[in-house]
Amino acid sequence: MFDFEKLSASKLYAAPPVERVVEFSPPGIDMQNISKVLSLAVDARSTSAQGFDGYAEISGRTGFRLTYIDREGNPKGVDYNADFSVKAEGDFAPSDNVSATITVVETDVEAGDSLKLSAVLSVKACAIRREELNVLVDADKCYKTTKTAYLPTFIASKNSSSPFDSEQDAGGEVTSVLSMSTECVLKKAEATEGGVNCSAIVIATVTYVEGGDIKERAFKIDVEEELGLEGVQPTDSVWVSACVKNAKLVLQGVTDDNVLRVEGEAAFCIKVFRCAEYAMIADIFNLENEMDVTVEKQRYTCFDGSGYFAEKAGGTAMLGDNRAAAATVNAIPYANAVASKAQVEEDGTLTVEGVVNADIVYTDENGFNSVRAEIPFSLSITSEMPFSKEIEASAQVQQISASVRREREIDIDMILAISVNGFSPVEFDYISDINLGDEKTQNTSGVSLYIARGGDDLLDLCKALTAMPEDILAQNPALEFPLSEGERVIYFRRLAM
């Protein structure tokens, strides 16, 4: 009599971001040999994420790249790694599919009696939980009303790595490599019939010493990834996170004519979602028997998709009066963008605000020096892609350059890569169970009068008058639903003699 169907749905959950301070004191450092710190570049990525009852455990690795001037005035560079773990409390379970995004918020270096490198990380843990709903979709010998509801479903996921490499002629002999910073910037991620196609750019910035000068080379390496994923359809939404899994610099060529070769792997974490429409019973009425109906309420979040944009930004770094005037900019070993606010305006455009922190190495009358620039940005983005009401945005520095405009003013030009994820909340009630009860006591009155409440529909009338809809409408063909407050409905019965 009652037809129930098992429907699969996926619940998306994100815990509030957790800040984690990672501090590292490299062993065996001769502090007497460090004259001046030029830059501290920091990156961080998640290596594992696991759900437990009430919390998620995230492990990761932080990379520190220190550039400094030694006591003899020579630029030096050194790399360190520090592992970390953090607990994010929230509505997690062991069966959840958990992932984490990590943003470097702040960096610092203390060079006193000992060297201490530190970074403030913002860790956001997200979970996907599969649920199965027992939903009433049809019933015999009953009057029912139907409705449609959207259910988000987690279709598939896959982790993948893509190798990359590129080389450039240094034009001379590289005497020292100071640092290499890397970013993996997504350009496109789309579902296909049975798979996902992704494209990204690996941005690698190599800072080195050649002929006594600090120089910089920027690499832009295209990475393409085509993955087969069973069950994926072109209309599905793709959620991708990407990072540089590992990278190294290899010096090649001959003496006085070195070649800089960057090689490594880019890691992609791909998740595919579908928000499908289902028909289900909204309300039900049986003329002959009482029914115990169990109605449940659900709230889900549909992942709508992602958008990727490249936007220009810029600013000015000011040197204090106590500093010597800058002559030329040599390199920008570190540039990190943090999106602090993202919202959709009334006209549909997207506003993203945040700050870029960049270490600018320059030359003054005393030799090499550096300044940490903090450049706020506010971007207004228009696109053919409709933006959702609930969005998350992240920012990366895709390109950056600087030049001395005046003695104590350094102009900075940037291209920021903005990634946007859109979400839509959905709510619905559904009938999860029905128990058929005793026979109803039939109304034996010859005529019934019903005074409507505002918003009553045909099913409300059926319940109040104990009558089937076709009988009520036959006697009241002019009824229009929903009924108005106080509207009168008269129903006559044919009684057995």
Image: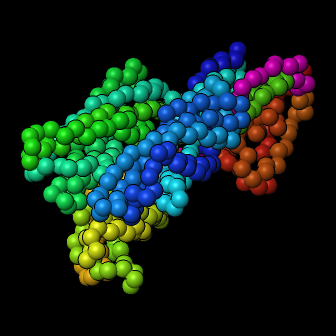
- Count up the numbered dots: 0
Q: Is residue 242 visible?
A: yes
Residue at coordinates 75% horizontally, 28% vertically from top-left? 285
Measuring from the top left, give residue 80's x and y in whole percent.
43, 44
| Residue at image point 44% right, 52% down | 30
Estimate the x, y position of residue 381 in percent, counting from the top left: 36, 61
Q: Residue at x 22, y 47 (%)?
A: 220
28, above or below 135, in the image: below
Along the line of sight, the residue nearer the viewer: 27 or 425: 27
Viewed as shown, does residue 374 lie left or right of 450? left
Name the residue at 18% across, 49% down: 174
The quadrant of the rendering that contains the C terminus is top right
Q: Which quadrant holds residue 147?
A: top right
Q: What's the image's color scheme?
A: rainbow
Q: Is residue 327 above or below residue 492?
A: below
Q: Is residue 82 above or below residue 347?
A: above
* 346 sits to left or right of 73: right
In reply to whether residue 437 is colored magenta, the answer given is yes
Residue 98's x, y, as percent?
56, 33
Residue span colored magenta: 424-442
Which residue lies most toward the top here? 1
Q: Quadrant of residue 95?
A: top right
Predominant SS along the magenta part: strand
Q: Image quarter for residue 449?
A: top right
For this rendering, which residue is in front, 232 or 205?
205
Does the stretch in magenta take in 491?
no
Quarter of the image for the N terminus: give it.
Answer: top right
Image coords of residue 395 (percent x, y):
40, 54
Specify whether residue 151 is in view. Answer: no
Most foreground residue, 155 or 409? 409
